[in-house]
Amino acid sequence: MIRNRFNVRYHFVLLLIALVAFSSLLFTSNRHIVKAQDQDAEIIRVNTDLVLVNVTITDAQGKFVGGLKRSDFTLLENGQPQTLFSFSTEETPFAAAVLLDTSGSMEKRLSLGRSAAIRFLDGLRNEDVACI
């Protein structure tokens, strides 16, 4: 019995030493790989004076306001007016997740929530994605 405990402990210590040696070998080889990749990597630096600013305009009730022109906007940086080099409007696709509360407190209103979710999905464009 004592001999078996010694053998188990001895094998455990050997296994532990092997794991430590293997992990240190793995660590040093990974460091060399990372250094080699860093040396071969190309660094690209770009300076630009043009910044894209996306905006969505809504009224006081939160409804989308369309038909705006370049003259309707003023862009300020640190209080200083900036020149608008380009101005365009476009509709972009979006992704949405609609959550429905199905708890007991919503029992009487759940059909209303489902109907609203269906109407929302019916209004999506082909490029939009949504889940309920």
Image (cartoon, grey):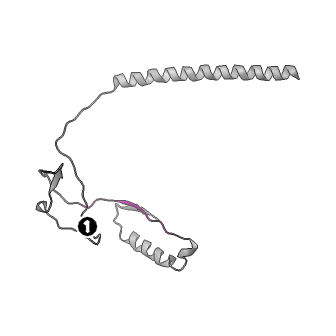
* Res 70 → quadrant: bottom left
Callout 1 crowding tier (Cα within 10 Å): few <14, some 14–19, many ≥20:
few
Front-lying residue, 107 or 37: 107
Magenta-drawn segment: 90-101
Estimate the x, y position of residue 51 in percent, counting from the top left.
20, 46
Looking at the image, residue 95 lies above or below residue 105: above
Looking at the image, residue 131 lies above or below residue 41: below
Looking at the image, residue 114 lies above or below residue 80: below
Q: Amino acid at mark 1?
A: Thr
Estimate the x, y position of residue 107 in percent, counting from the top left.
55, 77
Most extreme residue toward the front is: 79
Indicate whether residue 94 is drawn in magenta.
yes
Question: Quick check: 124 left or right of 47?
Answer: right
Question: Quick check: 110 left or right of 22?
Answer: left
Would you name the residue on which mark 1 appears? 58
Residue at point 73% right, 23% down? 12
Estimate the x, y position of residue 42 in percent, counting from the top left.
30, 27
Residue at point 51% right, 69% down? 101
